[in-house]
Structure formats: C-alpha cells, structure tokens
Image (cartoon, helix red, strand yellow):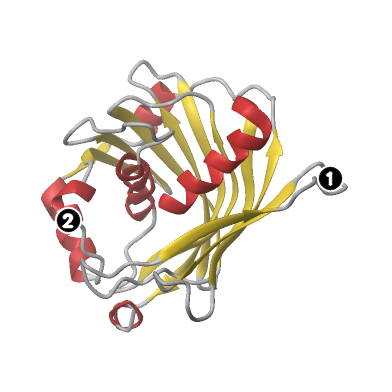
Amino acid sequence: TAYLEMLLARARDAFGAEGCVEDVVIQEAMLLEDAGDLRLVQTVRAAAVDGGGALSVSVASSAPDGAGAWITHVTARLRRDAAETSPGVLEHARRQCPLEQEMPAFYADLARRGLQFGERFRPVSRLWRGEGQALGEIALTDDDGGATLFHPALLDGCLQVLAAALPVDGDALFMPIAIGRYRLVDRPTARCWSHVEVRAAEGDTRRADVSVYDETGRPIAQITGVSLKRASRASLERL
C-alpha cells in the first residue's frame, strides 16, 4: 500500500485532484530483513505523456549508499480522470454480506497461512461475508494520517477484506500482483468501509474490485481490476 501512496502522490503532482493510477504491476517485493534494514527508494516518472495521455512511472530501490543495482518493484501509468464515481451502494453491500466474521479468527487464519500482521496493521474492526464478496469496517487505532493521501495502514485494511471475499483454499493465500485502476475521490478520515467483489476466477488467479466508502456511505476510492495469484505458505516463508 505504500507503493500506491507514492504512485497516487505522483499522479496528483502531474494532474491535480483528477490524477489516478492505472496498470499497476508489482514486479518484486521490497524485502527488509529486520527492523533496522534500510533501502533508498525513488520514483521515476516520464517527462511527457504518451499517445494515450498517460505518464509511465516506476518505483525502485537500492542499498542506502546507492551502491549496487537498482531493483524495480512496481510499474504503473498515471493519467487524468475526471469521470464521476458510481453512486454509493454501501447499504446494498450490507444486505449482500449477512454473515459476520469474528475478527480474532480472521487474523488467526491469515497467520496460520503465513501472513502475519502487527497490531498497527490490523485495522479491520468488523467484517461480514457474502457470496463472492465481503464488507469490512476499517478504523485506524490512532489517527496519525498526517500528510498522506490515504493512510497506508487504513488502505491495507481495505485490501485485507479481499481475503474474506475469497473462499478458503487450504493453506493458500491469494496475493495482489497487479491493479487495473486506483482513484481517490476524497481523503478518508480514520474510519471507512471496504466492499470487495470477486469478479473472476481462473486457475491460480483471481480478480476483484474494491470500493471504499466514508461513514455516510459516500464513495471515496475505487480500486478496480485487482489481480491476485495463489501463494502457498511455503512460498511466503521463502520471502
């Protein structure tokens, strides 16, 4: 989610409030071996738009002293999008997701499958499931959004709801590898709602859309075309 924050900031720099992020491809995870490990991170943006009116951008990192090769972690395209968001459907999502999930069990199941979250990155406070979809209430434990457009912990919680929308498949997890489009309509407060709908499933991949609403049900963000790929616990342990 830190990648998305960086990319959206660059989109806003280029296109103002109408800037959005498209065609996000996660090429390689940025691995920090311990709490003291550091990486030098930079975003590189094209100087001019292409024929489709978009700017290409990438996020890369290297050792803190700049020595060694730069590793590209994410590529994307930035463009202007002034289209209105679709009408809010939060109440409809509530009706479609009637089964409440116990939160300790939700995070315990993710941990069992190899995905551990610290207390600060467990912002899903309540969760409901439906058929191929899920709805989560997301809240920061401390309101320290500062200058961020969408606090990474809050956005991470919105994406964690993906795990509830997908059927459990043994020890496997489905991890995001690409995003079709990310648009932020308004900066969220410390509390919001995330509605996930699974759109397609084929082999080891899934595709879903994430709609984010404020406490009144007003749409504030859309993350569409989220592609996920199956990752076993053994593969996560190798990271």
Separation of residues labelled 1 and 2 (CA atoms): 41 Å
Q: Is residue 207 above or below residue 237?
A: above
Residue 149 quadrant: top left
Residue 145 quadrant: top left
The residue carrying pointer 1 sits among few (fewer than 14), some (14 to 19) or many (20 or more) residues within 10 Å by Cα, namely: few
> Can residue 187 be seen?
yes
Q: Is residue 73 above or below residue 197?
A: below
Which residue is pictured at 53% across the width and 36% down the height? 222
Of the numbered discs in the image, which one, if any, rests on residue 118?
A: 2
The residue carrying pointer 2 sits among few (fewer than 14), some (14 to 19) or many (20 or more) residues within 10 Å by Cα, namely: few
Q: Element under label 1? A: loop
Q: Position of residue 201 (x, y in %)?
A: 54, 62
> What residue is shown with label 1?
52
Give the farthest residue toward the left: 104
Which residue is pictured at 43% across the width and 26% down the height? 187
Q: 15 left or right of 124? A: right
Q: 60 left or right of 189? A: right
Amino acid under disc 1? Gly
Which residue is pictured at 35% across the width and 81% down the height? 235
Q: Position of residue 159 (x, y in %)?
A: 38, 48
Q: Position of residue 152 (x, y in %)?
A: 35, 44
